[in-house]
Amino acid sequence: MFYIHHTTCISPQQTFPNVDIAVLHPPIDGQLRVIEPPYTGIPSGVLRRMSRSVRMGVGAALPLLNGVAAPDGIIIGTANAGMEECFDFLKQIVEYNEGLLTPGNFVQSTPNAIAAQLGMLSGNKGYNITHVHLGLAFENAVTDASMLIQQYPENSYLLGAVDDISSYNYTLNLLAGWYKNAHTKAQNFYDTNSPGSIAGEGVAMFMVNGNAANALAQVKAFCSSHTTEANAVEEQLKNFLNKNLAEGEKIDVLLSGENGDNRLSKFYTACEELIPEEALVLRFKHLCGEYPTASAVALWLACYVLQNKPLPAHIIKKNFTVGQFKNLLIYNCYKGVQHSFMLVKA
Amino acid sequence: MSRIFVTGMGLISALGDNVVQNRTALSAGKCGITNLELFLSKYTGILPCGEIKIPTETLRSRLNTHEQGITRTSLLALHAFNEATLDAALTPSQLTSPDTALIGSSTVGGMCLTDELYQDAQRGEQGSEYINSYDCASVTMYLQQRFKMTGVINTINTACSSSANAIMYGARLIKSGLARRAIVGGVDSLTKFTINGFNALHILSPVTCSPFDDGRKGLNLGEGAAFIILEKEEDCINKKKYAELTGYCNSNDAYHPSSLSDTGDGPYLAMKGALETAQLSPANIGFINAHGTGTENNDLVESRAMIRLFETPPSFASTKSNVGHTLGAAGAIEAVYSILNLYHQEIYAGLNCKVRIPETGLMPLNEYKKVSLHHVMSNSFGFGGNCTSLVFSKS
């Protein structure tokens, strides 16, 4: 499909600008919030007017935009960007009874503000889009990038995903039963055998194109689905592996989106049982928490793993081996209805 | 690569709750913009909007929708979806087939329930039935679940060009082989959020909008939904083909979060790119369904961009003078109108333009006409500089 040449990640762990994930930063009050870096590349006047999700997205993307030739388009996946501003504007509406309101929050509340700001700051007049399909927003951005690169193999695209915790989406998801109570510790997060996960957020950006030379990794294949049935997911994975692994090839790393929600365990267990028993199984949601585009952080981590960088013990679920990994599978499930597989190759 | 045809259409707007009613009203030069009646707000009775005069509960019972947490936005989408899929005679097995894609789009999604959302976000004892329905994707997710769809499902939000991008994305999925057919479109309903947002930006017109008129006073918001069915040529044998989708392009103006650049680079590049995809020259376009919101900024910049590309632009008009600006639905609604232009070889009058903008001297078409048309362009430009143009051709 395409090759990843550069990637950045702003997450609740130390991932930007330098990466050090040996020490785990735990959740605070049941939330894993990103460590925001100083945004040295953004003019201060512009930075002041940016919403948190926009500055996180722009902050992570700028090093990619500055480093190489301008991309031919900007493709962003986000489910929640602009939520904070959206509710701030909503608050104005309710509290001032639709009186005279200031429009700043309204303009900043559109989810396409990140891709738009990136276009504006880099003067990029190419393809510019924002996919918002909840737990598959990033996956649809991946599909979009792969179609463009299939059509224009010479082109490069900035592909990324951004989601942030706002007090409002946290409350909504908590009320809907998607988070455990605020006292859950990162250490026992996966083993609580209770519903709900930990709220998270993050940004991952990728510069992608069709050129294999010097790439960090290749996104080889990808599929997504909407289902509540574990056996449907199982069938899909079987077909996916049959179709995309050459004769004699096997998955040597599974990067699992397990999130400690016992209602979703059946999906993750089913997938784990379908890959070779000796495969290394890694988890990442204790790094970034649960949020709709967490799979973008998984793809960033996949690049890290495939670069044979040191793996901290906390990401390993089973079968630690040192070696050259070739085929890494990401499986992620959002709220038990949206599923995706990504095959990433070294 | 296979050619892509439109085999079904569904539409609900202030001009009517199906395609036929919309065509009849457009042909008669009717305006669906009236003072808000059903929507309860401080502006009820005084603000002109393209409101669909069907109460939410009537829609719910008419559509036989008994699930919890279904918003007006989802109901409007379902209404248009049903008409489009029936029109294209898609079978239940085609709907559930993994090679049928559904690409929806919306800018407000379930946020039409401003007050419920406010209550839920302020944390009541427990969430309301709408707790999982506020986001933009909730509409597409509802259609996916209701019809047990298994193909590529996506939701796009690029503000006011959202559904033009949904149409483009669906076409690209088919061309890439990721889908065999695509149900593409968009929806938005009136909300306190958008009414107050555009009001705070001072771009809501206190009277019925007059796109491209020198004295234009801003836009009227509207609500509506439209879906079209895209199919590959080889699947259209013995099927009604309304039009061919030949051109599309998405480009960014890269200028300002809520207004277009003076030179209109984004609109110009989108229109130019759509012609290139269609392998057409400017002279081939017989009519443009302009974005034409009626704001100071849009109409001037769009006029400049049309002159820049076409020198002497073809006939053009904005149907926002009939149904208001339906935001995330606008691109799809106007795609349907453009397809009607081609299928019936007729063009509809833009309303209320009396005086040309002096700088550009362009006058939108102001009367209904029967014409010979081969290619129609439809423009959609949004906040964040997200510009998309589509070209439909006579099938």
Image (spheres, rainbow, N blue to C red):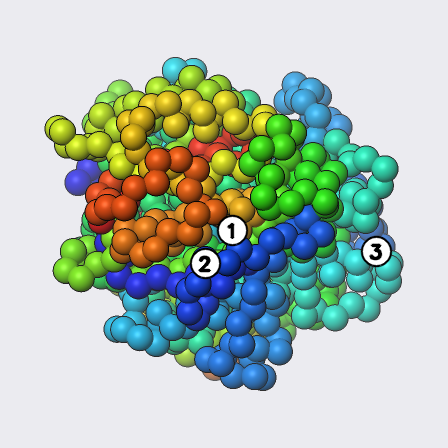
Residue ID for mark 1: A287
N-terminal label among 1 and 3: 3
State the residue at coordinates (42%, 52%). A312
Question: CA–CA distance between discs 3 and 2?
Answer: 43 Å
- The residue type indicated by label 1 comes to Leu
Q: Residue A21, labelled with which disc?
A: 2
Between A62 and A29, the one nearer to me in the picture: A29
Q: Residue A177: tell me if it is visible.
A: yes
Tell me the quarter of the picture where residue A70 sits. bottom left
Tell me the subunit letter for badge 1: A
10 Å crowding of disc 3: few (<14), some (14-19), many (20+): some
Tell me the subunit letter for badge 3: A
Dot 1: what SS? helix
Above or below, A173 relative to B203: above
Q: Is residue A248 left or right of residue B246?
A: left
State the residue at coordinates (61%, 67%). A51
Q: Where residue A142 sits in the image (x, y, percent)?
A: 35, 48
Split into 4 quadrants, where in the image is the N terminus of chain B? top left
Between B124 and B137, the one nearer to me in the picture: B124
State the residue at coordinates (45%, 73%). A120
Evaluate if marks 1 and 2 touch, with contact meaning CB atoms under 8 Å apart. Answer: yes
Residue ID for mark 3: A94
10 Å crowding of disc 2: few (<14), some (14-19), many (20+): some
Report the label total.
3
Dot 2: what SS? loop
Between A307 and B192, the one nearer to me in the picture: A307
- The residue type indicated by label 3 comes to Val
Q: Do the residues marked 1 and 3 share a common chain?
A: yes
Q: Where residue B181 sits in the image (x, y, percent)?
A: 33, 31
